[in-house]
Image (cartoon, rainbow, N blue to C red):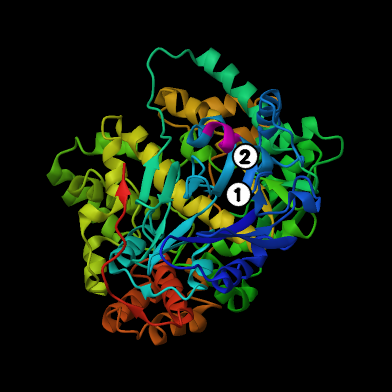
Amino acid sequence: MCGICGAVSFRAKVSQQKILLMNNGMIHRGPDAGGLFSFTNCILGHRRLSILDLSEAANQPMVSEDGKTAIVFNGEIYNFQNIRRRLEKAGVVFRTTSDTEALLELYRLDGADMLDQLNGMFSFAIWDDNASRLFVARDRLGKKPLYYAFEQGVLYFASELNAILKSGLHREFSSQALHEYLLYDFIPAPHTILRNVQKLPAGHTATFGRHGLSVKRYWDLPEPMSGMDYTHSRAELAVLLEDAVSLRLISDVPLGAFLSGGLDSTLITALMAQRMNTPVKTFSIGFPGTSHDESHWARLGAAHVGSDHTAKAADFGRIRELFPRIVSHLGEPFADSSALPTWMLCEHTRSKVTVALSGDGGDELFAGYERYLARRLQSYYELLPGVFRRQFVERLARFLPSDTEYYGVSYSKKLKLFLAACNRLQCDPLALVPNTFTHAEIRRLTDCDYVATNDPVPAIAAQWMGLDPVSRMMFADIKTYLAEDILTKVDRMSMAHALEVRSPLLDYRIVELACKMPLRFKMNAVSTKRILRDCALGLVPQPIIERKKYGFQAPFGLKIKGELKDWCRTLLIEKGRHGIFDPKELLRIWRDHQENRADNAWKIWSIVVFNEWLDQATAPLVLTAGLEYRHE
């Protein structure tokens, strides 16, 4: 797990000093080694976190024996040993035992066709001096990030937005991205908060040569198939789960696991325990005194699999210290408040191990969220007479209290969220991803420009409109919420502590199998994750198999009314005077929350994060036309 950067220009000499500044800005991603390598038209930079082949020979940038090809690579290729054996049969003589060299030699043999052979998480850049071309790729699900930008004929790229800005890049604030951020809590690829910086979308490549930049998709989710047999699919899934975990245990440094006590993380830990000679080191963060504290579930799971478990309570007294650091590491506005406990979990885990396995992906692939059940219920609710819905159900919801309790145990909050989702989908069938603010609320809050046809999320949702209502929501989540929220959060918070996180459930073979399965394999009228729960039988304690999903959410709604009230009000109201947000609307949002008229915790948090990001963006932000690229 590392940080990569570089620049390419066919007009002027690239500044090595700029690339050095970019590279040094990512030391947290790779504290073990760093280096640059220069060609006439390209400079590559790399920061290394050593996981495999700890020798100096495996440092990057890695250059081919003839000096004509070089790679910088962030991630892990789990099947690199199979790739290596194939290359050795083709006559390749290796100098290291690293997966990086296997990638480099695979490109030299197969070019862009190499990607179909990779099982892993990655973003990498390869400079081909013979072709005067940069080839860049990002993994199928988007576990590893990549940003790029043009300025004065130079293409810059890096693992983090902040690293690109170390080049002195002109900053062009995007009001379109601000609107998207307020809608979704994240900014969907290819957009960033800066109009002149782009994210390479998951499952895409970019090629940059003398004729310009071309961005292409090389992988996508397969659609559900008819005629699949449940028993056969369950057996296939069980085999893939075992293999995916086994592949992710290859490491030359200490390894452990996140263990929340949920089905996904407990199953992964149980499979690890079967394959390791010593007890798995497991780690969790709890929320004592809240209705969604999972500490006792984590202890149950740890006792069952025999792991060496350590737990910590989330310390919200540290928020004033951690908040600016978290916002800085995220690089752009990102409003998932679970970034704070994720930071604490990664910090806690890194004190004992360098690599941790997680259960990320299980909810999106196997219908684990309650809102998937709610979406099915919406289909029936919409059949009720409109008068009944408006005069009885919606009127009842308006009289219910707006508490700050966790939504999983608050029936009034569940009903309000259910009705909001119904109304949203009736107005816009493409609005499959949950919204924090509505479009109308954003227009009252800020006058930022927004063009619906430029928003990537509806475009992704439209791709899956031929599926049933629940499946189309799940597929949209995989391409947006999973890639841009969950995986972004885990990457930035883990890399802030030089911790590598591996996600066996996101092995592309499991993803493809899950997507091909009909919905009935995953959920019925009352329960979720049907096939995954069946695979967990005998491995995971029955109470954990049967328990419902709890989100990894911090209890900010209550704390904003209590110990964090003054601090949060300052960040919202005082720091909100940048001329971007309407002061009266900010005050209304605040008062409605404090006076129990609405639970505005996540709205407040999203604005607070943006204000802190804006404070940290010390260079001037200007509004100009953004970068355009050709997408095929």
Which is more toward the observer, 90 or 33? 90
The image shows residue 536 at horizontal and vertical percentages of 64, 28
Rendered location of residue 346, percent (x, y): 67, 58
> Residue 446 location, x and y as percent?
26, 74
Q: Residue at x 16, y 51 (%)?
A: 391
Name above or below for residue 21 compared with residue 78: below
Q: Nearer the viewer, residue 74 or 238?
A: 74
Residue 611 left/right relative to 235: left
Assign the magenta stretch its main secondary structure: helix
Q: Is residue 107 magenta?
A: yes
Crowdedness near tag 1: few (<14), some (14–19) or many (≥20) residues, C-alpha within 10 Å? many
Tag on residue 103?
2
| Mark 2 → mark 1, Cα distance in angstroms | 8 Å
Q: Name which residue type carries label 2.
A: Leu
Asked whether the viewer can see residue 287, the reply is: no
| Range drawn in magenta | 106-110
Per the image, label 1 sits on a secondary structure element best described as strand
Residue 71 circle label? 1
In the displayed structure image, the side of residue 281 where residue 293 appears, left or right: left
Element class at badge 2: helix
Asked whether disc 2 touches disc 1, contact meaning CB atoms under 8 Å apart, the reply is yes
Q: Residue at x 20, y 47 (%)?
A: 428
User: Which of pointers 2 and 1 lies earlier in the amino acid sequence?
Assistant: 1
Q: Nearer the viewer, residue 600 or 502?
A: 502
Residue drawn where x is 45% and y is 72% of the image: 609
Is 276 magenta? The answer is no
